[in-house]
Amino acid sequence: MTIFIIILLLIVGVVLILLEFFVLPGITVAGIAGVVMMLGGIYLSYQNFGSSIGHLTVFGSVVFSLLALWLALKSGTWDRIMLKTEIDSKVEKLEENMVSIGDEGICLSRLAPMGQVRIKNHIIEAKSTGVYIDEKTPVEVIKIVDKVIVVKPLK
């Protein structure tokens, strides 16, 4: 019965560690429980069967863990779970004469401090001077730095 408990602890420990490694982000209860179960199985083997069987248990659990990790990576199961979305959208580039200092427009989204504005029928990403500017607020272009439009609210 003790051998069954030791093997069960080691197998469940490896499964929990694999779940921690592939599915659950960060250090969670599953990873901690997996390590505790594996250490408990190794401790029981040392306590009940002596040091030679304990050493074999440590070696066997390391080999089993590495084999399980290799099989989990090779199986392709994780490819079906992985996020494979690609971002293929592009930001509209600011042309030389598209916007100039002093042009007026309106905020399409809240500028906190970045957002979208409509200037001369172009929707452009803009930056406020540091203050939050609400949606539908009239704005004026005060400077253009490295193709970034800086606006301030009209009073």
Image (cartoon, rainbow, N blue to C red):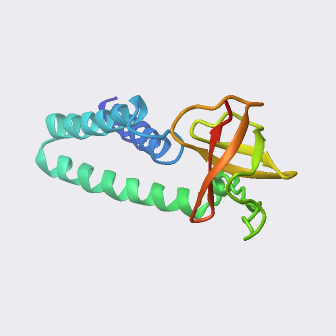
- Report x, y in % for residue 110: 68, 33
Residue 136: percent from left, percent from top: 77, 31
Choose between 80 and 60: the one closer to the eye. Answer: 80
**Which quadrant, please, contains the N terminus?**
top left
Quadrant of the rendered image containing residue 131: top right
Between 125 and 142, the residue placed more toward the observer is: 142
**Percent of width and height locating residue 118:** 80, 46
Which residue is at a point 57% across and 65% down the rendered structure image? 146
Q: Residue reaching furthest left? A: 51
- Residue 139 placement, left or right of 131: right
At 35% from the left and 59% from the top, the residue drawn is 63
| Label total for image | 0
In percent of width and height, residue 140 lies at: 69, 44
Left or right: residue 52 versus residue 116 is: left
Q: Quadrant of residue 94?
A: bottom right
Residue 85 appears left or right of 15: right
Query: Which residue reaches farthest bottom?
Result: 96
